[in-house]
Amino acid sequence: MNESRLNLLEKEDVTKALLKLSIPMIMGMMMQVFYNLVDTYFIGRLEDPNQLAAANIAFPVFVLLMAIANIIGTGAASYISRCLGKKDYENANKTASISFMLVVIFSLIVTIFGVLFCSRIVKLLGTSDEVYNYTYEYVKIMFLGSITVIGSFTLGQIIRSEGDMKTFVRGMMTGTILNIILDPVFIFTFNMGIKGAAIATIIGYSVSLIYYLSCFISGKSILKINKNYMIYDKVILGEIFKIGIPGSLNQMLMGVANVVSNNIAITYGTLTVAGIGVAMKVMMIGTFIFIGFSSGTQPFIGFNYGANNLDRVKEAVKKSVTMTTIIGIILAIIFYLFSENIIRTFISDNDVVKEGSIILKVLLLSLPFIGGQMIATVTSQSLGKAVLSTILSISRQGLLYIPLIILLNKFFGFNGFIYAQPITDVIMITLSLFLISNMLSKEIKHG
């Protein structure tokens, strides 16, 4: 076993440990952002609002693939971290092996289902006649390459569960750099447009997946993927799905919310769809920083909970919420001041820039409140609290945002439509902090 990684989780100063774990993870998440921003940038260079709108409309499919990966990756990472905390290395290796088996099974199902029903799915996403063909091309390629997205993200989650953030980041960077190189080649040189962006994305994820597999096969990681462990295990599967399904619900509902949002946005015209698409991609910078930070805390919280170091768990949660709130405020101010220039980076169409800038300024109100929600959700997952994890996962986009965006749009029109998300996040941060504080108090009292 690599004792230095385990010592980081068990003995290092909490603040230093969180930063050491989270900064590489944030860098890795920035690679995810670049995947999407690079696609948006080069598609925007086509100066075709229809193709830019199609990329936004197709985004829920990518979210769906990530959500499926989260079912496996988040559930496995939570259980593996707890196993390592208890020094139960055999079950940790079994969990990693079974997770890879699930990746193959789930990916085959998604590919077959997605290709067979691609046309119907694209229509449900909220396309207009002008953007249908572009959306269909992009979505079909994403379904065909689903194993690369699901596999690379899942194996990355498993690698970070042992505290190896550097390997996780290397895998993401390798795929992202390749995607950046291939995007202009396929989009412009081969004149493939949005279809070329999809192909470049899948190739990038393929390389990341191969890199992660090589780490497990070569023995560079603490965990091992062994074909002899790829068997039915009721306990391990139960642990994976108990945490993985609630953990992925938020992303699944995010995809549903995006579909609802697109269907409302299309009533305001293609320019609004394109504008909100760029604004949402910019918001991803902040959101993925918080995902990275919260994901970085997961092995620390899970390990110390498994080792019964509850004071370290509580301290980690408090400091993580504080740090993500400060980051959110700083990012909101910077993006607000340069909102129009940021939107113009992706497309020069003045109408899209104007629309996107208005939407972005409103969405930025959410940034100070997103990080704390994610820390609360990851904490509940790390501690194996399935019920609380489910509540937190379904509340933001499901129970709150979707009803709010429909109602506010109905009564207040466009303003209600764009203010639904910030209102949701103010409510959600209050609920999240109350529930997680109550849960931690009970754990420490009975610990």
Image (tube, rainbow, N blue to C red):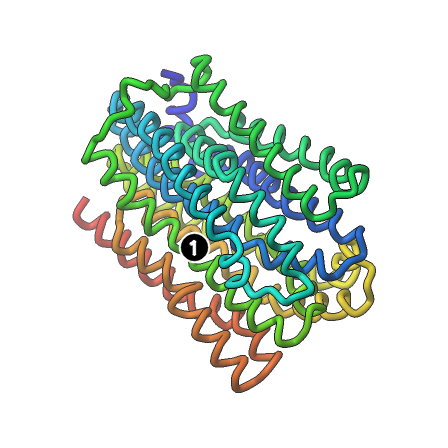
Q: State which quadrant residue 273 falls in.
A: bottom right
Q: Nearer the viewer, residue 352 or 50?
A: 50
**In the shown orientation, is residue 27 left or right of residue 152?**
right
Residue 282 visible in the displayed image: no
Residue 272, position in %: x, y?
A: 68, 69
Q: Is residue 47 left or right of residue 35?
A: right
Q: Is residue 154 placed above or below 53 in the rendered structure?
A: above
User: Which is nearer the eye, 278 or 29?
Assistant: 278
Q: Position of residue 444 (x, y in %)?
A: 23, 48
Q: Position of residue 366 (x, y in %)?
A: 55, 64
Residue projecting furthest to the bottom: 411
Q: Which amino acid, by three-letter code, is at mark 1?
A: Met
Residue 303: x and y, percent?
32, 34
> For the point 22% across and 30% down, which residue is it?
232
Q: Is residue 97 above or below residue 257?
A: above
Q: Residue furthest top?
A: 218
In terms of image quadrants, where is residue 278?
bottom right
- Against 295, residue 261 (above or below) is below
Report which residue position mark 1 lands on.
Answer: 252
